[in-house]
Amino acid sequence: MSHDASVGGGAPSKLVIRNIGLMLSGALEKPILDADAIVAIDGVIVAFGRGKDLDMTGATVVVDAHGSALTPGLIDGHVHPVAGDWTPRQNQLGWIDSCLHGGVTTMISAGEVHTPGRPRDIVGLKALAITAQRTFSAFRASGVKVHAGAPVIEHGMVEDDFRELAAAGVKLLGEVGLGSVKDGETAGQMVAWARKYGIQSTIHTGGPSIPGSGLIDKDVVLAADADIIGHINGGHTALPDNQIVCLCESCNRGLELVHNGNERAALLTLRTAKELKQLDRVILGTDAPAGSGVQPLGILRMISMLSSLGEVPAEIAFAFATGNTARLRNLDCGLIEVGRAADFVLLDRPQHSAGQTLLESVRLGDIPGVGMTVIDGQIRTGRSRNTPPAVAVPEIVNA
């Protein structure tokens, strides 16, 4: 079931999930909902609340959550896909499916930069971006939504190139700074062109990630004014503390914290955002596949790390990986709201955790056990093959 690559379609469907022990909304303003059931029709949330108040008749699939928690599907805001479910960086097959088993239902490309022989001429880089946008839209590995087609800007690009990319369906820029454009003035001009045509931008932050890339410091980041400050905690090498704090204080752009970065710098960013009362800017990614490999549990690890060491409630840390990203990226998932995509993860505290509840176990730094993933109202996986086994596990009670 988890290897079904179809995008959707078929007969009308109604999914009912009942006996939910805890429902996390993904929204900072109200992270915990007074609800124990949710209903989705044709892949869209139509109702949630107390089961006794909902119309659960006529369901095509009923899931008994057996007291496990439900959260919106996790969003990995920083990945580097290449072709389907294969990454040449580690010559690994099935990395997207493995991340699905870590609760990730949506991924956002920061550039298809690991493509062997990646074209750096303007015609070629546009062709690669459009191809990636097309292929990942048409083929969902294990059902995971991969928003791809993120060109890396190079010197010589003009406004018309961005207009052409947008007209072809490209909605993202790859990490600014991974190509030849590394100065703030040029980057700022190209980011502005991209924004004019509805293309979102991310900028590399910190030292070089692999041989051939370079340093992008706070002055370049501020001058470029990209929508997302990509891996502000370094990918892997972080900027000095005073530059990180300056970036947090000097703009209102997204603050992306990645697994493949400097953990101390991530905690500094989180503390600064908290002091500024701007936790809505914090989003999460893995920055994988990369030289350090693929981290199927990377987003869950970030949630647990930021909650346990960053002293934020676990339900807030979950929002960093769901609603915050959905809002900054204009996605139709990531929040438990009527009309949103029915992308869910059912999970619980791991067996033998010192924490007595899911939220307490995360606050203590443990990784939750995933019992089921749902994308567009379709069950994609049962119990995860990668997380520790959960205490409570959901069950399909009809099909």
Image (cartoon, rainbow, N blue to C red):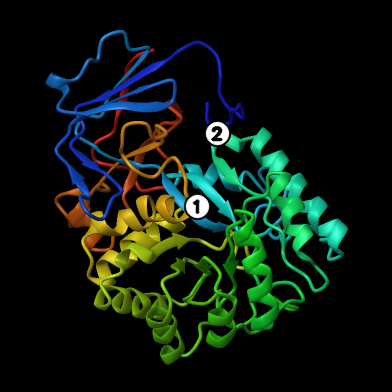
Mark 2 lies on residue: 143
Q: Is residue 111 above or below residue 330?
A: below
Q: Is residue 164 above or below residue 396?
A: below
Of the residues tagged 2 and 1, which is closer to the observer? 2
Q: Is residue 90 left or right of residue 348?
A: right
- Residue 77 screen position, x and y as percent: 50, 56
Identify the residue at image location x=51%, y=71%: 231
Identify the residue at image location x=51%, y=86%: 239
> Which disc, if any, is residue 296?
1
Residue 125 visible from this viewpoint: yes
- Residue 381 screen position, x and y as percent: 45, 32
The reply to whether discs 2 and 1 touch (Cβ–Cβ < 8 Å) is: no
**Label 1 secondary element:** loop
Q: Earlier in the sequence, mark 2 or mark 1?
A: 2
Three-letter residue code for mark 2? Gly
Quadrant in which the C terminus is drawn? top left
- Decide which of 147, 63 is in the foreground and name it: 147
- Residue 13 screen position, x and y as percent: 42, 15
